[in-house]
Image: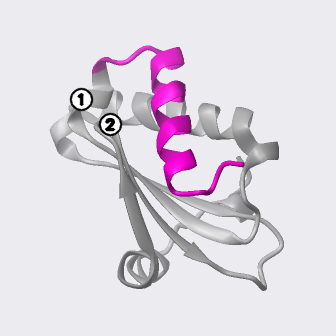
Amino acid sequence: MRKSYRVKKEAEFQTVFKKGQSCANRKYVIYMMEKPEQAHFRVGISVGKRIGNAVARNWVKRRIRQSLLELKPDLKQDCDFLVIARPSVAWLSQEESKKQLTHVLKIAKILD
């Protein structure tokens, strides 16, 4: 995903944490904040050290980004959201990871 689709700054992450709504399932937590003035969605991805070393964390982030890229046309465009991976995500296949991410995005009403 291009940089314009990412939440990168710490202050932006904290704003979404504090003012956004959260939804979760067993694998992911989503924080979502509506921004009506925005042209397209922005996403921040957080993968904690409990998942593994840097290689494992980057591998999980790549899988999340790929799943979001495939779901991009169906995602709500006027919001910022954060995807936080729980430790059990490390052992999922790409298909199962996408299925779990789709599930939590539907709960959060980000995915139509």
Q: Is residue 63 magenta?
A: no
Kind of residue at disc 1 = Ser
Residue at left offset 52%, top offset 67%: 8
Judge by depth and name the residue closer to the eye, 101 or 107.
107
Estimate the x, y position of residue 55 in percent, counting from the top left: 34, 28
Residue at left offset 39%, top offset 57%: 23
Query: Mark 1 highlights which residue?
Result: 88
Q: Is residue 109 magenta?
A: yes
| Mark 2 burial class by Cα count in 10 Å: few <14, some 14-19, many 20+ | some
For the residue labelled by badge 2, is the local secondary structure a helix, a strand or a loop? Answer: loop
The region drawn magenta spans 91-112
What main secondary structure does the magenta stretch of the protein show? Answer: helix
Q: How is the image coloured?
A: one colour
Residue at left offset 72%, top offset 32%: 70
Estimate the x, y position of residue 60 in percent, counting from the top left: 41, 31
Query: Mark 2 highlights which residue?
Result: 27
